[in-house]
Every structure is written in structure tokens, then in C-alpha cells.
Amino acid sequence: MPRSDGRIDAGDKIASAISARAWNSMMDARDLVVGGTLSTSAGASAAGAGGAYCQVMAKNTSGRTIPMWGGCRITGITPSAGTAATGGANAQFARSPTITVAIPSSASTTDATAVALQPIKAGQLGMVAVAGVVQCLATISDTTHTRLSLGASSTNFVSGTSGQLQILWKEGTGTGKLALALFSQAPDFVRIGKTTSAWAKGASASIAVYSGSGGSETATGETVTAWNKFVAIATDKWVIVVSIGGTYYVIAAECS
């Protein structure tokens, strides 16, 4: 008779002793070692295999469940691997790295991002997508938005004009909408907008982003934080900022 942990005792016959849960767990472990895909275990819910994305194992360090297709911030790896090429942590990192993820506490258009491929309970492991094309949940506020970014304290991505994912298709406007998106972490962007306060040389400041052209630009309601490496700029002045490796810098400004 199978034990509660799925193992068998001496003299037991494998055919009658192995449970579906134990067999599926063994297959999942095999897949992790050889770089395969986690299948749906008996009684569990998981996304189907074969998606157009790169997936890795992740540990949810948040205090609540990340739902299937929910967004999360990548915070590190576990166990922590060092610089030396020895030790158990390094061996696991070389064989099959496991990342740590969390529900974001603040909004971000540049942080490294993952999408849960199955519900991942607090403190538990699950598969996440980190590259490629993936389904996700999003709050779509404008049909013209082309990007998705991490929202504050939410597993829903937020639509906008910048973000870690490019929208390929969206269900419509509203909260909890389905979307199909392409990962493009830390992309380069050019934005036009206005300063929201006096901006000193060598300091960072918040920029109100505008869209439109030909003198009909209007505020989008989005802001980005940028760095000024040149001269002081007064408040409410037009500026152009560019994102380099995920950090915005001013490259042109209206004369003060």
C-alpha cells in the first residue's frame, strides 16, 4: 500500500504501490533536470506545455498567491549561488536555476518581469515565463496603448506607452482583461513631456509624458523619472528624454 509521501516499502510491488501524485511528481522532477516542461499533476492546475515562451521555476516570496497569467517582479535566485564554481547552490544553479518572484509593491516600467504559468501560492514553487510570447492579465485603460508594465501591489499588468511587454492582442478595456504580449525587458524609449518641478543638474526628476504631434500634444497621465546630466531646467518646460538600459536621461530641453 502506498505511503502518504508517495514512497514504497521493501517488498511492495511498484505497479500497485505508486500513486498518480507520486508518479507525476517524479516526472516533474525529471523534466526540471533535463530542461523539460512541468506537466499538470493530479489535482493541480497549470498552464499547458508548448507555449511560445521561455519558462523557469520560481518561488513566490509574496504573502499571497500569484494567479495564473499574473505578473510579478523577479527579485533573485534561490538558493543563492556565489562566485565560486563549487557548492550545492552553485551546482543547482548550473543544473536548473530557480528564481524568486514577488508581487510588486510599486509600479515599474523597467524591472525584470515574469508571468505565472500556473497559480503559485505564497512561499511555493511554480513555473513562470520570462521571455517570448505569453498570455497575461492586464488592466487596459486605453485601446491605443501598446505596452504593459507592472502595476503597484497587483498581479495585473497596466497598459501604457512604456513597459516591459509589447501588446500583441488585448481583450478590450477594463480590469482583469486577457492579453497576448511579447517580452522586451528594459527597452529603449524616447519620450516627450514636461517637467513637473524645477530640475537641477545632476538630479533626477519626474516628467509628465505627452502624446500627439503638430502642436496638439496632450498629457497621457503617465510619468517617468529621468536624470539630468546637463543644465538646470525650470518647471513646466518641454523636454525629450531617452531610456538607455532602462534608465531615462534628458537629451533636449526648452530654454528656461
Image (spheres, rainbow, N blue to C red):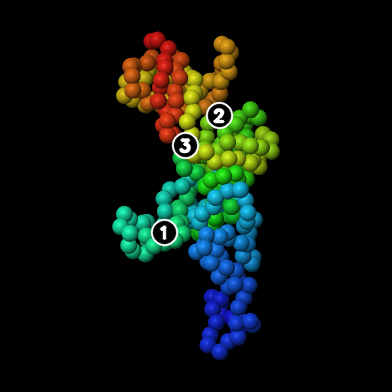
Q: Which residue is mark 2?
A: 161
Could you say where residue 117 lies in the image, as x and y percent from the top left? 59, 52
Residue lying at the far right in this picture: please name it. 171
Q: Nearer the N terminus, badge 3 or badge 2?
A: 2
- The reply to whether residue 158 is visible in this rendering is no
Name the image quarter holding residue 142: top right
N-term mark: 3 or 1: 1
Q: Position of residue 22 (x, y in %)?
A: 58, 73
Image vertical order of residue 183 relative to residue 232, above or below? below
Q: Residue at x 60, y 45 (%)?
A: 134
**Marks 1 and 3: in contact by CB < 8 Å?**
no
Q: Is residue 189 visible?
A: yes
**Residue ID at (49%, 19%):** 193
* Quadrant position of residue 212: top right
Q: Nearer the viewer, mark 3 or mark 2?
A: 3
Q: Mark 1 falls on what kind of element?
A: helix
The residue that disc 3 covers is 186
State how far apart marks 3 and 1 are (Cα): 25 Å
Quick check: marks 3 and 2 in contact, CB under 8 Å?
Answer: no
Residue 10, placed above or below residue 173? below
Q: Nearer the viewer, residue 151 or 92?
A: 92
Quarter of the picture containing the N terminus is bottom right
Mark 1 and mark 2: span between their CA atoms?
A: 37 Å
Q: Which mark is residue 94?
A: 1
Please tell me whether mark 2 sits on a helix, a strand or a loop.
loop
Indicate the amino acid at tag 2.
Thr
- Between the residue at mark 3 and the residue at mark 2, the CA separation in whole angstroms equals 14 Å
Tally the numbered discs: 3
How dense is the environment of label 3, judged by Cα within 10 Å: few (below 14), some, or many (20 and up)?
Answer: many
Image quarter of residue 80: bottom left
Q: Position of residue 35 (x, y in %)?
A: 52, 59
